[in-house]
Image (spheres, rainbow, N blue to C red):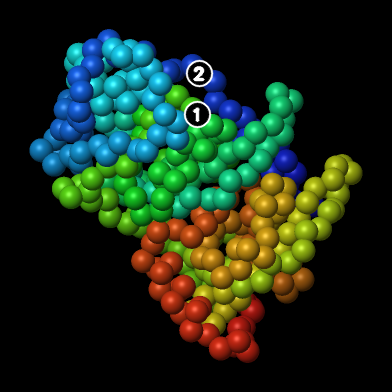
Amino acid sequence: MSANAQQEMSSNASLASPPSVSQRPSTPTQSCPGNVSADSMPTCSDNTSTSETQDHEPTIVPAKSSTANTAPIGARTKVDQVEGIVPKTNSRTRYLFKQLTTGVPATWVFFARVLARNPVREYQNLHGGGKFLEAFVSDTAGDVIRITLFNTAVDQFRDVIEPGITCSFSMGRLKPSTRSVVTVPLEATFDGVSEIRKISTDQFNIVEPSLHPAVLSAFKDTTHGSTVTTLAVVHVVDGLKRVKTKKGAPLEKRDFLVVDDTDTKLVCTSWGMLARNLSDGVQGQVIMIFKGQFSDYNETRSVNIGVPTSVLFEPALTRAQQLLSWYSSLAPNHSFSLVHA
């Protein structure tokens, strides 16, 4: 069993750990009824630059709350804390992903387009269990990071972060990316006290990021051990298998087949939590495999989805829509060629 497979087990444990409440912003002390325009949000300090201008920022659209507002009259509510007019010292400062660090003030906010939203998964660790949802978002500079919602945040925000929708994200926790890095080595986690809101895009547009996925037929020239990124349609999902590592530890494994419009098919191997959560339900979906490890073993070419790999389900990309249209038009007996050197 590869080192990636063994690392996946420890990776799953670290991924499925709810964030602590450290680095939470303090509650603002003033409020005002009504919405606040994102124009009132200052950009980051003058010694850093953004590609977004204050004159063309979006208006925050309040998300529908999953619970009724039962706060006493005059009490601060979660909506007030974000939408109220607050002193400048407590206002939110907007950052691009490359400007964010774990040391920035807790009043940070970023605007991003949801690139992909993966299925909800469950986790178990020494502290108990719960559920989480990971998504990938892009900013105006074209950078992409992973975000993770834990437990109550899954119920609150799952329907807000729809692929293709632009949102504001605040009151979360920033941390170095330890599992997978898309374009920036940072990720954000959100829980029940976080804020995620849809925003108007009338004057605010985030273009598609350039992640440069390769077509499957291009892998005929790829060498063993190379890192690859591809966008393809899930064609066949194999059954779950239980194997053992070299040290005798149990581990789940699942192979699946992806195809694209070069009439090429490629075997992909998933491990651990991803293998358990894959099912026939993903057949026909477009996925992006980002930084998979290419393998050429016994003349069988495949992509191993290990610790450094990100998998994006049904990404909101033009190329993904093209693949869906192509796949839906295929005849039932359409044949594909395996990748060969």
Identify residue for label 2.
Answer: 21
Residue found at x 51% / y 78%: 327
Q: Residue furthest left?
A: 55
Mark toward the viewer: 1 or 2: 1
Left or right of residue 245: residue 98: left
**Contact check, label 1 and label 2, Cβ < 8 Å:** yes
Left or right of residue 74: residue 32: left
Q: Which mark is residue 191?
A: 1
Q: Can residue 273 be seen here?
A: yes
Hey, what amino acid is under mark 1?
A: Asp
Within 10 Å of disc 2 (Cα), the crowding (few <14, some 14-19, many 20+) is few
**Secondary structure type for disc 1:** loop
Within 10 Å of disc 1 (Cα), the crowding (few <14, some 14-19, many 20+) is many
Would you place residue 62 above or below residue 265 in this image? Answer: above
Residue found at x 89% / y 44%: 248
Q: Residue furthest top?
A: 29
Hey, what amino acid is under mark 2?
A: Val
